[in-house]
């Protein structure tokens, strides 16, 4: 079963706008991670937020985590055409070593 | 830099063939994973391994097996390839549990 479910499935914005993607998960977690995938390539790790953290920043990325709602959001500020990609959240299911991903959000940033 | 290498970018095989997909990592990582990715379904976990010769089933293990004889190498085996196994296959490794994963470039397998 997939642990994370991203929302929306697809998002199209203009360059310079902010993009927000959401992720919901089902079981307890130690951390939640976000990954990026350019078309037809492998995934690249973006950011990891631990279960005792509420917010984390990395450059233009801001991640929040609400363990009471079992949800996370990824905000990309001042988006660029180069941010066009699919974004996935991932968790270790129920504290196990099994890393599971959601279905992803496909982001298109129009120049 | 961590390098996770999958043996092929593109592969075409015939129905019924035994297919081997190889994945090698060069950083002494403990855990390795095989996923398949299909449009609209995201990444689904096939098998993972947390040590040499140790493996656990993921969410969709049917029709697949794996082998991890050496720490750096994790092989995915399609015992008898079928057209519904046409997909993108992604390998990943993790240095220790609960840390970030490093992915290979993916193998796009077509079974005809």
Image (cartoon, coloured by chain):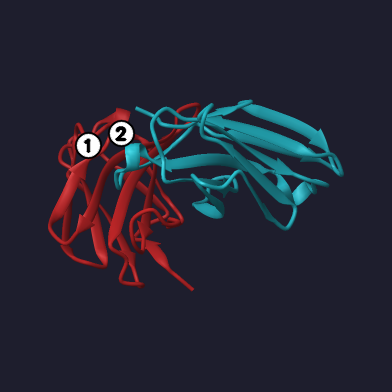
From the image, which quarter does the N terminus of chain A lie in? top left
What residue is disc 2 on?
B85
**Answer yes or no: do the residues labelled 1 and 2 have beta carbons within 8 Å?**
yes
Q: x and y percent of residue B14 in the render?
A: 25, 39
From the image, which quarter does the C terminus of chain A lie in? top right
Q: From mark 1 to mark 2, how far is it between C-alphas?
A: 7 Å
Give the colour chain B carries in the figure: red
In this picture, residue B10 sits left or right of residue A83: left
Residue at image position (28%, 32%) is: B59
Residue at image position (79%, 46%) is: A77
From the viewer's side, name the closer residue of A93 and B11: A93
What residue is disc 1 on?
B81
Specify the chain shown as cyan. A
SS category of the residue bearing label 1: loop
Q: x and y percent of residue A80 in the render?
A: 80, 49
Residue at image position (14%, 54%) is: B54
């Amino acid at each position: 079963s997939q642990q994370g479910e991203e929302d929306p499935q697809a998002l199209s914005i203009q360059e310079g706008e902010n993009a927000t993607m959401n992720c919901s998960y089902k079981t307890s977690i130690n951390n939640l991670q976000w990954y990026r995938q350019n078309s037809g390539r492998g995934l690249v790790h973006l950011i990891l937020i631990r279960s005792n953290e509420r917010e984390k920043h990395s450059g233009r990325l801001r991640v929040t985590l609400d363990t009471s709602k079992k949800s996370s959001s990824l905000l990309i500020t001042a988006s660029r055409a180069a941010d066009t990609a699919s974004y996935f959240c991932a968790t270790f299911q129920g504290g196990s070593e099994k890393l599971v991903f959601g279905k992803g959000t496909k982001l298109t940033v129009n120049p | 830099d961590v390098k996770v290498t999958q043996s092929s970018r593109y592969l075409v095989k015939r129905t019924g063939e035994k297919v081997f997909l190889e994945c090698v990592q060069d950083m002494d990582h403990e855990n390795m994973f095989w996923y398949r990715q299909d449009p609209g379904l995201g990444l689904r976990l096939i098998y993972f391994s947390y040590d040499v010769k140790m493996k656990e089933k993921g969410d969709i293990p049917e029709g697949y097996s794996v082998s991890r004889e050496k720490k750096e190498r994790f092989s995915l085996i399609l015992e008898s390839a079928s057209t519904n196994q046409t997909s993108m296959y992604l390998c990943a490794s993790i240095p220790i549990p609960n840390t970030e994963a490093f992915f290979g470039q993916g193998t796009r397998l077509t079974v005809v």
